[in-house]
Each structure stands twice: as structure tokens, then as C-alpha cells.
Amino acid sequence: MTASSSDCSACAERPLRGRRVALIHPAWHSCGTYRVVLGQIAAYRALGAEVFPIAISSDPGFVPGRDWIWKAFKQATPELDDGPRYYGGAPVSVVFAPHFLRKVLWPYIHGDQAAVRLGMAERTLLSPGLEGARFDLVHCNHFFLMPIARRLSCATAPILLDTHDLQARQFALINETMPWLSPRATYESMLARELEAMRGADLLLHLNAQEAETFRALLPEKAHALLYPAIPEAPTGPGGPDIVLVASNNTANVESVIWFLRDVAPKTQGVAVKIVGNVDAAIRSQAPEQYAAYKDWFLGRVDDPRAVYANARIALLPTISGTGLSIKSVEALSSGLPLIATAQAMRGMDEEALRLPGVVIADSAVEFVNALSRAAAIAPLDESARRVSPARRYYESRFSHSAYKASLGVLTAALISSCIANSD
């Protein structure tokens, strides 16, 4: 290989070499968004870019430089210690400003979640050195941080916005249980704020197929791309006797586990399931009868839920509610295990996910019982079989780090090149 061909190969592998990327994200941890952000950072670095991760708090007082107030976030996010950290937040004083009280706080006490998040972002102070810095690309996570993205873009760097589901829909669900003043903010009004903020981006990235379809219809004038997030893989072996169900403590998981214990488990004779995750406390309080009957099945929280797949033979996904892409469903696919799942568990994926050999879709309790009884009677797959299973191949083609990196490299290199061409 000649020196020039070697250089070309390096350019192909690292098309963002020398580029500076501002990566804006909410100051969240232990959630799906945080895991997506970690995948973004890893991919950009692998593509050769210099990444500036900027954690933004929506709580007043979380301004840069106040190390004590950021301590809990820093301790919960050790993965971000691999490089420089940057922060942003609005001072407490902004909350008492007349304009904030009238334009942000008043709508918020009526339930306008979009208004308060955008309002805090507009008043955010950033770590020294960020304002006025030159960036080749601004990657923004969530529409409500777009005011910061526009500031860092300086009207020259292109803005790529990761939408992370339709947020107005999430806000409307949150508001159902909140004691807001009347008249309450409507879904339509919050959606209008969301879409207006999104119009400032040059490219809209969507994490799942349904989300992409929805936003293409809502904003047909914008450029869109479907880019599944990079999700760390689960072990494909060595294998073992366990039938596993992974569930953290959120509303959708609680509802799903209760349905499984109430309608499916009593009809599966001789089958024991390991329920992994901190869903146990919620089941104990919300469904004490089911918890008492199956308390030996609950293992509680573990440091790495993906590790439970190593010694498993079957993974269960009895999901009956939830929105957006299910990260735990993708992790289960990556394990190469036989899966029994509802169609809801595969939400956000394309139609192929519902037809994968080794993945049984069972939407009713009867179907789930029958599928579990059949699967429990079949010899478990060994590690080599799991690694080449259709489920594993599906994961590798869409959700692996290499797949995400390749797609992100193509999209961002083209976006930066287009921006440079338009400025010349």
C-alpha cells in the first residue's frame, strides 16, 4: 500500500479527523438518554473528532464552576471522565426576573413543560471557553436545548438535532398526574413549541422508525434521518438454565411485570423465571399478592443487567406499554437468545424485528403461556449458535457501535461539507 492510499484509508475510517464537535445533552444519568449520549461520544471519537460534551441542567442554580452542586452528577457519570467536561445551567436569579415569571413560570404552572425547559436553556450560563469557540458541528440532544445549540453554532456550524421521541407526548403523559392550574397547557401548544425549536436544526436525527415517520409528517420541509442508537451488546454465552426478565422501576415495566405475574405465570407449570432489576419494590407495593406468590423470582437491582443474559437460555419481554425504542429489547436481541416478546416490546424497530427466527411474538396471555411452555422444552443454544443467530445479526446491523459509527460518519461528514460549500 502506498503512502497516499494509506492516507485515503485513514480518511475513510476517520472522516471527522480534526473536526470539533459540541455535543449538548441534558445532565441526566442512569437512563436511556445518557446511554445514547455515551454512544455518540464514542462514535465521534472513533471518527477522529474532538468532542466537547456539555451537560445542561434544567434546574436553577446549576451554573458552571459550582463543583459542589455538580458533585452527584459527576459521581454518577464516571464514563465522562475520559476527557474534558463542560457544564451549563441558569442562575437562581433568573427565576425572579419579571420576563421569566411572565413568559416561562406562568405557563409552567399551567403545565407547559416545553416552555420551562426552553426558558431555562435560553438563560443558561456555559463553562468558560465555550461561548465564541469555533465548532465544526453542534450535536444537540432534545429540542429544548436548541437555544444553546444556536448560540454555539454562531450561525456558521451546522446543527444536528437528536429528537429522542416526541416530547410533547411525554409531557402530556406527565401532566395527567400533576396538579396544574387551569387552563392546562394542551398537547397541541407544547407540540407547537417543540416543532418551532426543531426548525432551527439543519438535520433531524430520529432514534426509531415510528418517531422518524411522525416527524417527517410534522416537518416535511426539514431534512430527516433514521439513526438507531449504539447500544452496548449483552453477552452471548456461555449459556445456562436461566429464563430471564429484565425490568427497571418505571411505569411501563411495572405494568408489564404485573401483567406477566397475574395472567401468564400462574399457567406455566414447572417454569421459574429470574426477574432482574429494581422493579421489585414497585411490584411489592402495587401488586402485593403477585409479589408474595413469586417473591423468590425477584433478584433486585444488579450492577450490569446485561450480564444476566450470559447464563440464560430464554429471555422474556412481556411489554404491554411504553413509548419510544425499548433499550432492554435491543439488549435482549444482542444476546442471541430465543426471545418471547409482545409486539409492543419491539416498538420503534422496523417490521423485520417482528419476523426474526427465534423471536416469538405473543401478545395475549394464552399465546405467551404457550410460547414459554414450548421454548422451555427445547435444548438451549450454545454460545456459537447465539452469536450467529438472526436476532444477533439484526442487532449488529442496526444497533452495534460499528453500525452507528458508520452511519453517523456519513451523515455528519456530508452535513459539514454542505455547510462549507454553502459558505464559500
Image (tube, rainbow, N blue to C red):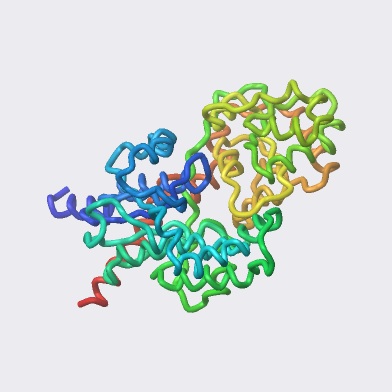
Whole-percent x and y of residue 301? 60, 28
Task: Please determine whether, in this image, residue 247 is positioned above or below residue 214.
Answer: above
Question: Eyeballing the image, is 374 above or below 139?
Answer: above
Q: Nearer the viewer, residue 304 or 34?
A: 34
Name which residue lies at 83% across and 36% down. 262
Percent of width and height locating residue 136: 26, 62
Q: Work out which residue is located at the far left of the displayed protein and give it.
A: 3
For the residue pair 15 and 289, the one nearer the viewer reads as: 289
Quarter of the image where the C terminus is located: bottom left
Does any portion of residue 384 appear in the rendered image? Answer: no
Direction from residue 260 to residue 345 in the image, left or right: left
Q: How many numbered circles are shown?
A: 0
Residue 410 seen in the figure? yes
In the foreground, 273 or 61: 61
Q: Is residue 421 above or below residue 32?
A: below
Residue shown at 38% from the left, 61% from the top: 123
Give coordinates of residue 189: x percent, y percent: 60, 72
At 40% from the left and 64% from the top, the residue drawn is: 122
Q: Quadrant of residue 349?
A: bottom right
Residue 6 placed where, x, y %? 18, 50
